[in-house]
Image (cartoon, rainbow, N blue to C red):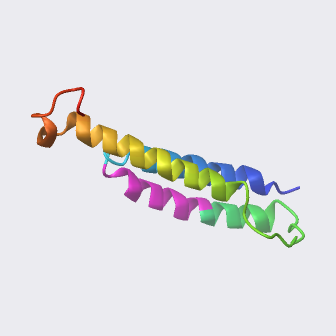
Amino acid sequence: DYDVYEDMDEVLILYGYTTLFVVACPWVPAVSLISSVLECFLDQKKLIFLYRRPMPNPAANNEPWDTAFDIFGVLAMMTNTAVIVFSSNAFEGWSHKHK
């Protein structure tokens, strides 16, 4: 049987790494885009040739994935801000306490 959680978990991990480290490696979003397109193509082939089509079930929302993506977004914002503040020359006049 097809497990949708396995595929969504891969997307969540890729999104997390991309957003958390985009300041350190600005080329990562391009690689993530290529990886996501390739993943969609491979998942399509997997669904067509290896698994039976899953029965569609109605859902009110996309939980727990919505919450997980929101949490990763907030963590990425804080991490990227900290990387810029502590490693940029724009804030070198500030003391470590004020940073």
Residue 21 higher or lower than 32, as above or below: above
**Could you say which is closer to the camera, residue 28 or residue 51?**
28
Q: Residue lying farthest left?
A: 93
- At x 23%, y 32%, the residue is 98
Q: Is residue 92 above or below residue 54?
A: above
**Which residue extends farthest top?**
96
Q: Disc count in the image?
A: 0
Residue 61 figure quarter? bottom right
Which residue occupies the foreground of this view, 55 or 47? 55
Residue at left 38%, top 50%?
28
Q: Is residue 22 rendered to the left or right of residue 55?
A: left
Coordinates of residue 4 in the picture (x, y in percent): 77, 57
Magenta residue check for 56: no
Identify the magenta region: 26-39
**Residue 56, percent from left and from top:** 86, 72
User: How far from the left and from the top, in percent, is residue 69?
Assistant: 58, 54
- Whether 89 is drawn above or below 70: the answer is above
Whether residue 24 is visible, yes or no, is no
Majority SS type along the magenta span: helix
